[in-house]
Image: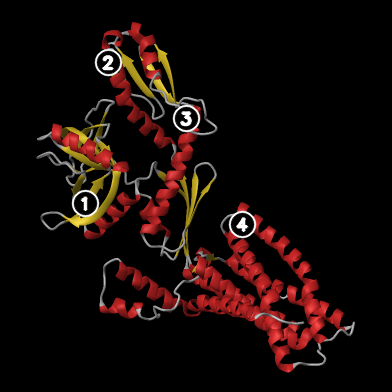
Amino acid sequence: MLQISLFRRIVIFAILIGGLVLALPNAFYTRVEQSNDARAVIESGLSNDDLSAVAGQWPDFLPSGLVNLGLDLRGGAHLLVEVQVEDVYAGRLDALWPEVRDVLAAERDTVGFVTREESGTDELRVRISEAEGAARALELVRGLARPVVTVTGAGASDIAVSADGPVLTVTLSEAERVATDNRTMQQALEIIRRRIDEAGTREPTIQRQGADRILVQVPGVGSAQEVKDLIGTTAQLTFNPVITRTTDPATNVAPDEILAPSLDEEGVFFVLERAPVVSGEELVDAQPSFDQNGRPAVSFRFNPSGARAFGDYTAENIGAPFAIVLDGEVISAPTIQSHIPGGSGIITGRFTAEESTNLAVLLRAGALPAGLTFLEERTIGPELGQDSIDKGKLAAAVGLALVIVFMGLSYGLFGWFANLALILNLCMIFGVLSLLGATLTLPGIAGIVLTVGMAVDANVLVFERIREELKTAKGPARAIELGYSRALSAIIDANITTLITASILYAVGSGPVRGFAITLGLGIVTSVFTAIFVTRLFIVLWFERRRPRTIEV
């Protein structure tokens, strides 16, 4: 007999109601979006009557998740960034120099005095005064090599060392360069994502392209320059010992020293030791604050290893200046008055409140491991996005109208049951997209339009099967039951193959292709649910109420 248990009916109605409730905020998109933004500001600690009024535009007890609009629908910034991975080689070799110096200085009787010579960014050149000790020096420096920590570089060393008389040349091995490039790209991706997330933008697209490029798409921003200002700053923070102060920009410095301009005092330069005491990598927190004079500043805190190194240095160098260096410029160069334990401090300078907040965001997100070059940038205006939305709505409305008319004329009352299920199906798609916080793009709208056409396929199979069963004069109830049971395998087979295709598109595609695959895949799942369960429930409820002796399909 044609029956559906009470429990299954409750579950089906619960799923439908849940999908409708989750999709509801999208019908009031602007109001809900403003309310969500106001609540986020209030949660950050700021509150006033205007914010409370805006937050109250949408009730707390209703879901507030929205389908995020992609770059092509909302407008925003598109950037293609090249990461200068070679910059990291110089930093690695600079960090290696103190180890090389110390290990050679320990055997000064054999190798003599050790000095660093000028060299390219991809090599470290070290001269020893005793040429006869070159073989021993070579052995000592090679002993500093470590294995490359990658699957492809297993068994290889991270450095290559050669000798030309009394001069040793240290370079990164090929395996280490490949591993370094991969680490640099992963770190750059993560830091760019953190910086953009800190700024509160919605659903940015940040993904690697090729060996050394990153695609950045940020919906909802006014211009590409805003994003460039946010992610383009290296924010490399170091604390370096000060050797001397000068006003001569042409001051000669040794290979293990650097000349950095002062940010506060124009025309003033500092000669600093190249190797920092601690770096921004050891920061665990940075927050905007104010100094003792009420001027904007940035307070910071180190991790345990950074706190220990910073504390030891300040204890041993009381009365000496040290420099706080940001991206090659000296922010300030205070004199150490006393031991600074605990690993916390404050950065002062000529900051505005906004600059101190931005600097704290950059430091908290972390320093970029290498410089960035912007190869491509463009701003997509919101007018173009609105035009895409309007055309997408028109396409969906026309497709939906044609399908509804066709189903109503072809299958009568059963066709109108299928049409009602189709509308519920679209609501469920938006409900699931809202629940997942997914991003809807123009190809995603194409996936929804395609789903409108595909969603009634299962109903067509069932209704045609019911027509065939009615010819055997088994009665309407039996015909409906057999129609659903015998069409089920064809429905599942057809939709599984399409779902596999959508899964492959999602796995190997990127950007717009993934947006299409997501909406297509969700549409397949929801359309099968509505065809097998929802339409059937409508027919059963109608049949139980009317008990017709014959039916027309």
Whole-percent x, y for residue 487 in the image: 79, 72
Which residue of the protein is positioned furthest toward the top in this rendering?
Answer: 132
In depth, the one of 339 and 546 nearer the eye is: 546
Residue 506 image label: 4
N-terminal of the pair, mark 1 or mark 3, is 3
Whole-percent x, y for residue 544 in the image: 71, 89
Tell me, yes or no, if residue 397 can be seen here.
no
Which residue of the protein is positioned furthest toward the right in this rendering?
Answer: 472
Tell me: 292 left or right of 11.
left
Mark 1–mark 2 distance (CA, rounded to whole Å): 39 Å
How was this image coloured?
Answer: secondary structure
Residue 299 image label: 1
N-terminal of the pair, mark 4 or mark 2, is 2
The residue singled out by tag 3 in the image is 148
Above or below: residue 184 compared with residue 230: above
Whole-percent x, y for residue 536 in the image: 71, 80
Q: Residues within 10 Å of mark 1 (few under 14, many from 20)?
A: some
- Residue at left offset 49%, top offset 71%: 383
N-terminal of the pair, mark 1 or mark 2, is 2
Mark 3–mark 2 distance (CA, rounded to whole Å): 26 Å
1 vs 3, front mark: 3
Above or below: residue 89 compared with residue 436: above
